[in-house]
Image: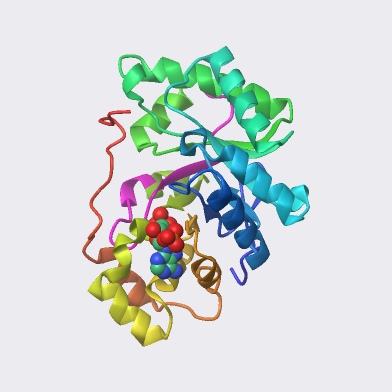
């Protein structure tokens, strides 16, 4: 990858810019609108949101107010845990599209595999939602469909009835938390791995290993973490509401990490914890 708008190609041929702009924990309203505009002005062409983030309306507004052509921006949103079932999924999709102000979505994901509300029948629940997503995909309303937070066993369960293999799995990934098993499962099946919380929600950035390597390369800790993600073949989705950081997180293409330093980062101590286990969420 040589620039922010270089792409990965999904299994169906759709291309996706190699760095996306994250919006989890970005408050709805002016903050979301202005940070999306700042991201598009800084050159991002890929925005990631979700129904659960509560900011789809503002993301849509930022997109319009930026003046960037809709067709030049890759937009992702996600189906929340409170919704499963064929009709319900179609309704939730329509609501998200209404909020975003879009007629075609680039990528729609099942946000979590095993919601608390469907814990007794998550396999069937996902299968029905996936069937709706396949139909929306086949009707041309979504350009690519995928999953998030799926471990291999969730993926295997979905594949029992899926006609379309998910093109993406979006999981929590950063130096010190490489999720090797899930990543290798996805790579074998040509599923693009997207990295959410690529900066460990910011907690990673004061880790000594990262600080030392940042000094060595003359880059910021955030830039080193994002470069690691790209060199791992991931699609990182850094979030920021701060214009200077939004821009800093785009400057990833004028250096490269050595193999030894990649290994150091992969194996570094994880100061951010393992996050929610998808089978034990309270939501
Ligand atoms: P803010 O949004 O206030 O600018 P992640 O992408 O892993 O979820 O991390 C997001 C967190 O990291 C946010 O708190 C964000 O702060 C912070 N952040 C994003 N980019 C940088 C950066 N380049 N330097 C320091 N902190 C950053």
Point 58% across, 59% down: residue: 18
Please state, as top left, top right, bottom left or bottom right, where the N terminus lies in the image. Answer: bottom right
Residue 126 coordinates in the image, percent (x, y): 45, 22
Closer to the camera in the image, 201 or 25 = 25
Magenta stretch secondary structure, dominant: loop
Residue 264 coordinates in the image, percent (x, y): 28, 72
Please state, as top left, top right, bottom left or bottom right, where the C terminus lies in the image. Answer: top left
Closer to the camera in the image, 265 or 161 = 265
- The answer to whether 266 appears left or right of 186 in the picture is left
173 in magenta: yes
Q: How is the image coloured?
A: rainbow
Point 35% across, 37% down: residue: 151
Point 57% across, 23% down: residue: 92
Point 47% across, 39% down: residue: 53
Residue 95 coordinates in the image, percent (x, y): 61, 25
| Residue 168 vertical position relative to residue 36 in the rendered view, above or below | above
Q: Is residue 226 visible?
A: yes
Bounds of the magenta segment: 162-182
Closer to the camera in the image, 27 or 268 = 27
Residue 88 coordinates in the image, percent (x, y): 55, 15
Q: Quadrant of ligand 1?
A: bottom left
- The answer to whether 247 appears left or right of 266 in the picture is right
- Count of marks overlaid on the render: 0
| Residue 168 vertical position relative to residue 215 in the rendered view, above or below | above
167 in magenta: yes
Specify the farthest residue to the front: 30
Q: Is residue 198 visible?
A: no
Closer to the camera in the image, 159 or 53 = 53
- The answer to whether 217 appears left or right of 143 in the picture is left
| Residue 144 vertical position relative to residue 256 in the rendered view, above or below | above
Q: Residue 57 occupies which quadrant of the picture?
A: top right
């Amino acid at each position: 990858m040589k620039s922010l708008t270089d792409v990965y190609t999904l299994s169906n041929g759709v291309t996706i810019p190699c760095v996306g702009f994250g919006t989890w924990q970005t408050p709805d309203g002016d903050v979301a609108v202005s940070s999306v505009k700042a991201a598009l002005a800084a050159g991002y062409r890929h925005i990631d949101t979700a129904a659960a983030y509560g900011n789809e309306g503002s993301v849509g507004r930022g997109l319009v107010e930026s003046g960037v052509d809709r067709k030049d921006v890759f937009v992702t949103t996600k189906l929340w845990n409170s919704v499963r079932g064929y009709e319900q999924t179609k309704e939730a999709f329509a609501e998200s599209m209404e909020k975003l102000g879009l007629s075609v979505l680039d990528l729609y994901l099942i946000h979590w595999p095993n919601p608390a509300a469907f814990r007794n029948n998550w396999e069937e629940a996902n299968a029905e939602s996936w069937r709706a997503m396949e139909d929306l995909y086949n009707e041309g309303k979504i350009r690519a469909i995928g999953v998030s937070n799926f471990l291999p066993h969730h993926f295997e369960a979905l594949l029992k009835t899926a006609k379309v293999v998910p093109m993406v799995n979006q999981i929590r990934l950063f130096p010190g938390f490489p999720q090797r098993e899930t990543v290798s499962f996805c790579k074998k099946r040509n599923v693009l791995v997207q990295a959410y919380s690529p900066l460990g929600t910011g907690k990673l950035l004061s880790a000594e290993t990262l600080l030392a390597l940042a000094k060595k390369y003359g880059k910021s800790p955030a830039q080193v973490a994002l470069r690691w993600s790209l060199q791992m073949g991931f699609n990182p989705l850094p979030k920021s509401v701060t214009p200077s950081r939004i821009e800093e997180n785009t400057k990833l293409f004028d250096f490269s990490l050595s193999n030894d330093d990649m290994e150091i980062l992969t194996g570094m101590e994880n100061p951010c914890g393992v996050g929610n286990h998808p089978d034990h969420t309270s939501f």
